[in-house]
Image (cartoon, grey):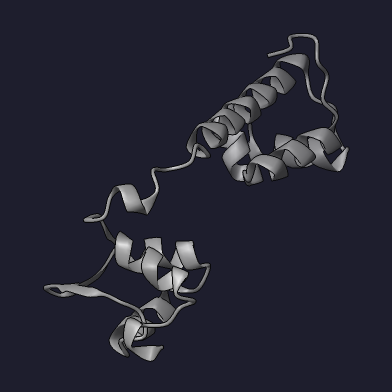
């Protein structure tokens, strides 16, 4: 972290948006008041150097968390028996979870019932995607 770096309110807001933090989350993470973050971003108040250092530290930490979590996961093919939740499949397909539930119920997407729960084999989902979203019998 650069010790002598001075951030303006606009730079704080830009970095906060980049790392996906709300003003409330940034304030809590940096241990400063929400009104301080709001006023700083609006340019209504200048912050003390220690406050800016706290904000910069919190933003750097969040960016490091995002960078660490952005490492690619092992492909589904290497884990053929892995069962995915509805939320996992919805995120993979970039669709709402309600669509995934509906598609599983109507057998539009390969699924497995585990008691009350709906799960999906990772390999089946990857194969379904490779087939253009069609079941083997739809060809």
Quadrant containing the C terminus in the rendered view: bottom left
Q: 28 left or right of 133?
A: right
From what the image shows, is residue 89 above or below residue 60? below
Residue beneath the point at 36% across and 82% down: 135
From what the image shows, is residue 132 above or below residue 20? below
Residue beneath the point at 40% across and 48% down: 75
Residue 18 image-quadrant placement: top right
From what the image shows, is residue 30 above or below residue 19? above
Residue 83 visible from this viewpoint: yes
Quadrant containing the N terminus in the rendered view: top right
Residue beneath the point at 77% across and 40% down: 13
Residue beneath the point at 31% across and 81% down: 104
Residue lying at the far left of the rendered structure: 115
Residue lying at the far front of the rendered structure: 139
From what the image shows, is residue 108 above or below residue 50? below
Foreground pick, 48 / 19:
19
Foreground pick, 100 / 3:
100
At which x and y percent is residue 62? 57, 32
Residue lying at the far right of the rendered structure: 43
At which x and y percent is residue 101? 35, 80
Query: How many numbered circles does the render carry?
Result: 0
At which x and y percent is residue 74? 38, 43
């Amino acid at each position: 972290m650069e010790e002598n770096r001075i951030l303006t309110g606009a730079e704080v807001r830009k970095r906060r948006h980049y790392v996906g933090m709300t003003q409330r989350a940034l304030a809590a993470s940096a241990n400063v008041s929400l009104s301080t973050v709001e006023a700083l971003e609006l340019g209504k108040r200048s912050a003390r150097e220690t406050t800016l250092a706290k904000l910069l530290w919190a933003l750097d930490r969040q960016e490091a968390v995002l960078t660490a979590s952005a490492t690619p996961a092992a492909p589904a093919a290497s884990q053929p028996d892995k069962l995915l939740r509805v939320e996992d499949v919805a995120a993979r397909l970039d669709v709402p979870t309600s669509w995934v539930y509906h598609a599983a119920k109507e057998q539009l997407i390969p699924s497995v019932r585990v008691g009350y729960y709906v799960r999906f084999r990772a390999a089946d989902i990857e194969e379904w995607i490779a087939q253009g979203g069609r079941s083997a019998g739809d060809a």
